[in-house]
Structure formats: structure tokens, C-alpha cells
Amino acid sequence: MGFWWRPLGLLAAVLLVAAMLWAASGASTALLFLAGFQAYVLLRRLWQEYRLSRWLEHPDEVSPPDAAGTWGDIFYRLERLQRRQNANHNQLTSALERFEHAAKAVPDGMVFLNHAEQIEWCNPASSHFLGLDSERDRGQFVRYLLRQANFLEFLDAADYSRRLVCKSPVNREISLSLQLVPFGESQKLLVARDITELERVDAMRRDFIANVSHELRTPLTVVGGFVETLADNPHLPEIDSRRYFNLMQDHTRRMQRLLDDLLTLSRLESAEHGLNDEPVNVPDLLHTLESEAQSLSRGRHTITLQIDSPLWVRGSLQEIHSALGNLISNSIRYTPAGGAIRLSWSERNNEVVFAVTDTGEGIAAEHIPRLTERFYRVDHSRSRETGGTGLGLAIVKHVLTRHGARLDVQSIPGKGSTFAAVFPQSRAIKAADGDNIIKFPAREQAAG
Ligand code: ADP
């Protein structure tokens, strides 16, 4: 109603003036006045219409018209409408930008397909996994670009609960899981997820179970066989039954060692099992390890120990003992009688190194990178003969990694090997005052 007051008031005022003119100067003056007013209204309207059309044509360049009266009201309302639209538009644009940024950052490949399976948009990950390009391939039919038979069959099936596992068409090393998700009227989203790592872990798990079963089968079969023989022949000569019992004991011990090593590995791998951070007196530990080595070798090897560094390391005494002990027991097991084994503890290039060098059978270069894999053995029968589980170096690698250290292996077939546990300077500590590191020479003298 507010709109009408002003124009109706103006009209009433004009009619009043016309009536007064009529009374004062006659009808022709009043009609002339009314015609003049009419012409003014028409011209003003044309002018405002011109301004309005100019503004509507270039709303961003021309400033909105402003006027008094009803035109002013109209302009004001139009401008408000335009401002609201601009705000909506900006909101939409920034929402779209946010969506695009997010979709670009998603690690999975995402391809938007319209009802005819033409590509509407795809993110950068889809270029990495599927070789698609958002600019180049927009509007292309996806089935012309990805032509593998299993993919076409997957598209045709349009079974949205199904996932297709396949190799990436651009990189055969990448395994993908593809899924179609329907949305909107009849659009689809094709999602490509990289499952290479999952597949690798799954394959490792399967291998591991197969390996463990294989490792347990032989001793179990042997023990089972002897138990049956003994049960069927209760009056076996004492010498035979004793031999059977000894063999059963050997195989039971083998299974026990395997289970112990498996438990150690699983304990080391479990995330909750944090690392002990105690000062470990490595020089002292090496003396203990040397005597353990002497008793393992039973005089078959010449074992020497050289300590050139007084440094200790921070970590778990029990784990470091087991890792270094493993390296030493390997060198004894893989070095024929009469060979030499040298243990050393020294500093080089800002690192502290425990090394065990043997004059054993050595290892060909192609095996070295795989030695720390679980159950990897260069010579299976040699490993079993000497009581190996194939897990020793896997345990060593885990322990060293937990201590920020690494395993260096150098070997010449037929000449011997050096296995070195290399600790970073950051793990090394100086023995605390009062700690009797000076006792090592004394011990060496005592041992000598
Ligand atoms: P195993 O229980 O079989 O000894 P490890 O994991 O300790 O398992 O070692 C893996 C393989 O590495 C061994 O089977 C052996 O072939 C090789 N190896 C380890 N240490 C030595 C060494 N000092 N000299 C020669 N070969 C070695």
C-alpha cells in the first residue's frame, strides 16, 4: 500500500491545480497544464527506462540508477535483488571451489559420469590411476577411454554393491579397486582406490601362514611317526627307542625355537610394545656375548673381541643382546671348524658399530638384500642342520630399526662375511661417571 500514497497524492495535487486553473483561466489553460504534465511524466519515464536498461545490460560497470519517487523505490528493490543474487552466487562459487579443492585432494580417483557415461569431471588422482585428464577428456565416453573387457562388463552390470579389482591401465604395478556410486538423476561416480599396499600385506600374510605351516609340518610329521612306531612296538630294543626319543627331542626343540622366534617377532611388531630406553653398556655386553660364543663354538673357532669405543647406547638391553647374539651365532653356525670370528665395537663417521666378521662360507651378492625376509635362507638344509629357524635376521632387523640402527652386510662367497649393526650417534651415550667401563681391559686380562 505504501507504494500508492505518493503517486496518488501527486495525481490529486495535479488535478487540484488543473481545477483551480480551470476556474481561474478557463478549460484550455487547465487542459494545457494537464498536457504539459503528461509530457513531463512520459519523458521522465523514458529517461528512467533508459537508465534501467543500461544498468541491466552492464550491472557490474554502471552504477545502479537512483531516483526519487516510485522509480527510486523500483531501483532500490532491483538493486537489493541483484545484491542478494550476487551473494548467493558468491556462496555457490565458494562452495563449488571448496568441493573442487577437496575432490582434488582426495587420494582416490573420482570420475563423474553423466547419464550417457560421458566424463563430466575427474580429479587429479584419476589421472594417476586411470590415465584420465579432466580438461582433455571432458565429454568423452568413459568406455572409449577405459576399454578393458572386465571394466566394460563391470560398467554394463551397473551393480553398485560390486567392486572390480584390477591393475591400473597406466601402471601395472598399481592394483585398483573400482566402485560405481549412483547419484543425482542418473549420474554415476566412479571411484578408483589404490589397494596395492593392502594386496601386498595380504600376500605377505598368506605367504607367512604357508611358511609357518611348512616349517611345522616336517618336525610334527617326524615326531608323529616316531610316536606311532613306539606305540605299535612297545618292545623295541632299548638302543632304538633311545635313538627315536633323541630324534623326537631334536624336532620338539626345533618347533620350540620356531615358536619362540615367532613370538619374539610378533612382540617386536606390535605397536603397543614400546621400546625400553635404558642405558645399555655395550662393551660389557660384548664380553658376555664373547663367552656365550665360546661355549656355542665349543673350541671349533678362534674368537676374538676388540673394543675401540667406550660408548654405550640407549635402548633395550634384552633386545640388543638378542640381536647381536643372533649375528654372532649365525657366524659360528655358517663358519666351518677352524675358522676365525672377530667381534668389534668401534666408532666411525659419527656412528657406533658392532661388527662380527667370520671366515665362513660367505653369501652371494644376490641373496644379501633378502636375508632379513622371514624364512629366507641361502641354503635351506644347511640352515636346518644347524638349528636355524630362518627368522634370526628378521628379528635382528626389527630390533635395529626400533633402535634407529641399521644392518650392513658385506660378504665374499668362499671367504667370509661381516654383519654390522650400525647405531646412529643420537643413540650413543657416554658411560656415566662412576660406571666402570675401565673394567674391560681388566676383564680382557682376566680372560687372557
Ligand atoms: P637361519 O635361522 O636360517 O640362520 P637367519 O635369518 O638368521 O636364519 O639367516 C638367514 C640366512 O642368511 C641363513 O639361512 C644363511 O643362509 C644366511 N646367513 C646368515 N648369517 C650368515 C653368515 N654369517 N654367513 C653365511 N650365511 C649367513
Image (cartoon, helix red, strand yellow):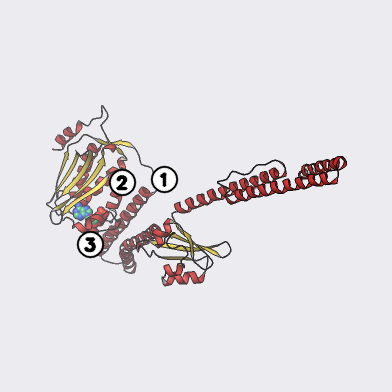
Query: Mark 3: few, some, or many residues within 10 Å (few <14, many ≥20)?
Result: few
Between 52 and 104, which is closer to the camera in this rendering? Answer: 52
Q: Which residue is mark 2?
A: 401
Please tell me which of labels 2 and 1 falls first in the chain.
1
The spot of residue 227 in percent (x, y) is: 33, 64
Give residue 323's position: percent from left, percent from top: 27, 46
- Closer to the eye: label 2 or 3: 2
- Give yes or no for contact between labels 3 and 1 (Cβ–Cβ under 8 Å): no
The residue indicated by pointer 1 is 272
Q: Mark 2 belongs to which amino acid?
A: Thr
**Mark 2 in CB contact with mark 1 (< 8 angstroms):** no
Of the residues shown, which amino acid type is indicated by label 3?
Answer: Ser
Q: Earlier in the sequence, mark 2 or mark 3?
A: 3
Discs 2, 3 touching: Cβ within 8 Å: no
Residue 364 x %, y %: 18, 58
Q: Which residue is mark 3?
A: 381
- Please tell me which residue lies in front, 405 or 139: 139
> How far apart are the alpha carbons under marks 2 and 1?
16 Å
**Element under disc 1:** loop
